[in-house]
Amino acid sequence: MPTPTKGPRLGGSPSHERLMLANLATSLFEHGRITTTEVKAKRVRPLAEKLISKAKRGDLHNRRQIMRVIRDKDVVHKLMAEIGPFFEDRNGGYVRITKTLPRKGDNAPMAVIELVSEKTVTSEAEAARKTKFAKDQAAAAPAAAEAGTDEPAEATADEAKAEDTDAELADAEAKSEEDTDTEAPASATDEATADPAEGADADQPASKKDES
Amino acid sequence: MAVPKRKMSRSNTRSRRAQWKATPVQLVACPNRACRELKPQHVACPACGQYAGRQVVEPA
């Protein structure tokens, strides 16, 4: 069950709040960036992200689900045709809120809420080298291997980490010219691939014993 | 209903109100090296409009 919203509704009644949030989301998708109060920005973010998730799927059912909230067909088309495909390689976090100075007049805390216009670092790196990280491809296999073996995995994990630190130092020197952002995932893949490999060797005999 | 027995003197009123003090706003230097203006924390800099290296708002 989703957590109920704390505090009073925006605008006084539930229907008024729905209308206000729908209008805010429509303006956000239309302009890409809007300035509003911090409270409204925080309330509209989950709604906007859910709508973008629906737009990413892009079928008729999801279009109708979006039409329940956003009544402007031009904005719905923009959402389905431009915004959804743009966020194809980003898993959530489509919207960014940045606080700004309080409003003159009533001193209400204000914020700028905007669609994130940058691509993720990993997607840029993958586009540059035209490959995928081994971590993403081999994520399923290690999970299955580690499930059966707990104790040997811990013993080998320490050895693997010791080796990884040496390897990381070597990698860091080698890759010093590369971008720092691409370096961290690369070292993560080393750990991910090294752990299951050693764990699998120690684990397979143990699991066979259990079965016999 | 309980009611005050005596009028509150001007002295007492002013002594009470003398404790109403405003606290200074905590300000930090803008991390933008070209700016370095004092600004409230966790807020886009009003002088240069940047936050965390991104241009968020137009400078005032």
Image (cartoon, coloured by chain):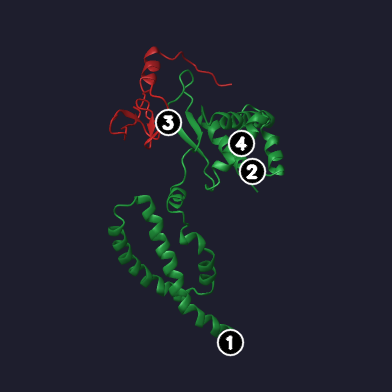
Chain colours: A green, B red
Determine whether, in the image, residue A133 is placed left or right of residue A207: left
Residue A40 position, x and y percent, is 55, 31
Secondary structure state at the residue bearing disc 2 = helix
Question: Do callouts 4 and 3 point to residues on the same chain?
Answer: no
Q: Which residue is mark 3?
A: B56
Place residue B25 in its image quadrant: top left
- Up/down of A130 relative to A191, above or below: above
Q: Which residue is mark 2?
A: A54
Q: Mark 1 or 3, which is nearer the eye? A: 3
Q: Chain of mark 3?
A: B
Q: Are marks 1 and 4 in contact (CB under 8 Å)?
A: no
Disc 1 or 4, which lies upstream in sequence?
4
Give the alpha-carbon distance from disc 2 to disc 4, as whole Å. 10 Å
Disc 2 or 4, which lies upstream in sequence?
2
Determine whether, in the image, residue A113 is placed left or right of residue A167: right
Give the alpha-carbon distance from disc 1 to disc 2, as whole Å. 49 Å
Give the label on residue A79, or none.
4
Residue A177 position, x and y percent, is 29, 52
Secondary structure state at the residue bearing disc 4 = helix
Question: Do callouts 1 and 4 point to residues on the same chain?
Answer: yes
Give the label on residue A212, or none.
1
